[in-house]
Image: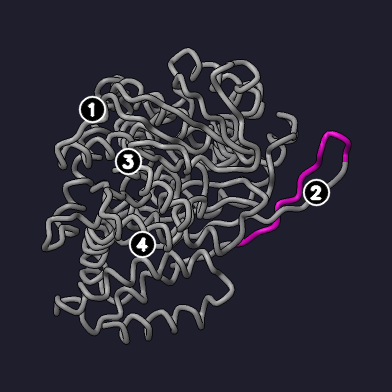
Amino acid sequence: MEAKIKAFMDEVKTRNGHEPEFIQAVQEVAETVIPYIAKHKIYNGKNILLRMVEPERLVSFRVAWVDDDGEIHVNRGYRIQMNSAIGPYKGGLRFHPTVNASILKFLAFEQVFKNSLTTLPMGGGKGGSDFDPKGKSDDEVMRFCHAFMLELNRHIGPNTDVPAGDIGVGAREIGFLFGMYKKIRNEFTGVLTGKGRSWGGSLIRPEATGYGTVYFAQSMMQTNGMDLKGKDVVISGSGNVAQYAAEKALHLGAKILTLSDSQGYIHDTDGIDEEKLAYVMDLKNNKRGRISEYADKYSAATFYKGETPWTVKCDIALPCATQNELDGEDAKALVKNGCVCVAEGANMPSTPEAIHEFHEGKILFAPGKASNAGGVATSGLEMSQNSLRISWSREEVDQRLKDIMEDIHDSCVKYGKDDDGYCNYVKGANIAGFVKVADAMLAQGVI
């Protein structure tokens, strides 16, 4: 089996040797899915996984825009349309200087499995640009978004490809993108998700990824006779996902100890309550400040510059910042300090070495493709509401989200439970996501 996995990965590396993030994502899937394929004749000899790792379409384009001083800038835009076997391509747009084809391909590949796990009819895609919205005026962001959509509109549509937001693409950016799409195409459709409430958006969508991560962690805990109430929680990040993960964890009775950004993390020994969280939301969403300012305001908090929060003693860890933020040494520290559950709110925030440590320590570990699927699940619910021209209540959307996350958890347990009773959620998520997509691909022939 190791020889089969190596032969497969050698072929992937030959084609994609300059894309380390993508290779990392494929490696994780290959190690769990290839043994499953070998045991099920229906998939044998069909090169189904090799077909999955090759994007159906990779679009790259120039984005030229003008800043407030009249200077012309040029950025690169991308859309990776990875797999449409079970529905239109679905996945976020990321605006960040680190964006490149490797990162977007890994995200698109993960998205295929994530979307499959939701049980909703959505394929996988991802896109974005190396444009950095930080420090830009609203007018500059608008001009960039309009220029970006001038090209992207050719490749998307409500039944073709439905982008959403991601890092650097929030409500402001979605609004500018949607406005230009509507103008160019002269139609009002559900082509983007994460829209404003008054023009086709869904309640709970901003909260969904963070809420869903906590719902998944709650399911893991309950399955093992534990509860979130009274538990100490360490969270990385302070953006959308981290904020709403903290909010839902607070609602369920947990104590939040940390938040972070690219400059470091704050540790509040008294806990980040709802009032303090409201301050963080205003600081990050409206004032676009730094998390270090939290420590200036609250005396119980300490700011640790240039560090990550994984050495803080906790029961539950929720990495909600970015890929590969939690390494093997961080994982060892979490296990040593008694952490019993890790649920990824970001995409692939744990390195392979970290995941190995979590499995060795037999603690509950949920990969992002399962635990952070709440965002795209609610995007799917937004698509449904747009198609039906209706709007569900906050309670109804939240309940549907909770049900979906519980279903994803159950699917992971179905395929991931080992003989000793320990659930390998990575294996479970990969196989559960693979089966639905693979079956659809087989039914549609070699295309």
**Residue type (three-letter) at the residue carrying disc 4:** His
- Tell me how far mark 4 sits from mark 1, CA to CA: 34 Å
Residue 358 lies, in percent from the top left, at 33, 55
Considering only order in the chain, which callout, 1 or 2, is on the residue closer to the N terminus? 2
Magenta-colored span: 60-70
Q: Which residue is mark 3?
A: 377
Q: Amino acid at mark 3?
A: Ala
Disc 1 marks a residue whose amino acid type is Gln
Left or right: 400 as drawn, with respect to 102:
left
Tell me where residue 8 appears, x and y as whole percent.
37, 82
Residue 64: say if magenta: yes
**CB under 8 Å between discs 4 and 1:** no
Instruction: Tell me whether the residue at label 2 lies in contact with that at label 1, contact meaning CB atoms closer than 8 angstroms.
Output: no
Q: Is residue 379 above or below residue 396?
A: below
Residue highlighted by disc 1: 399
Q: Mark 1, residues whose alpha carbon is within 10 Å: few (<14), some, or many (≥20)?
A: few
Counting residues from the start of the chain, the first of labels 3 and 2 encountered is 2
Mark nearer the viewer, 4 or 1: 4
Q: Amino acid at mark 2?
A: His
- For the residue labelled by badge 2, is the local secondary structure a helix, a strand or a loop? strand
Q: Is residue 51 located in the magenta-colored stretch of the structure?
A: no
Q: Residue at x 64, y 54 (%)?
A: 98
> Residue 198, can we see it?
no
Q: For mark 1, give the secondary structure.
A: helix
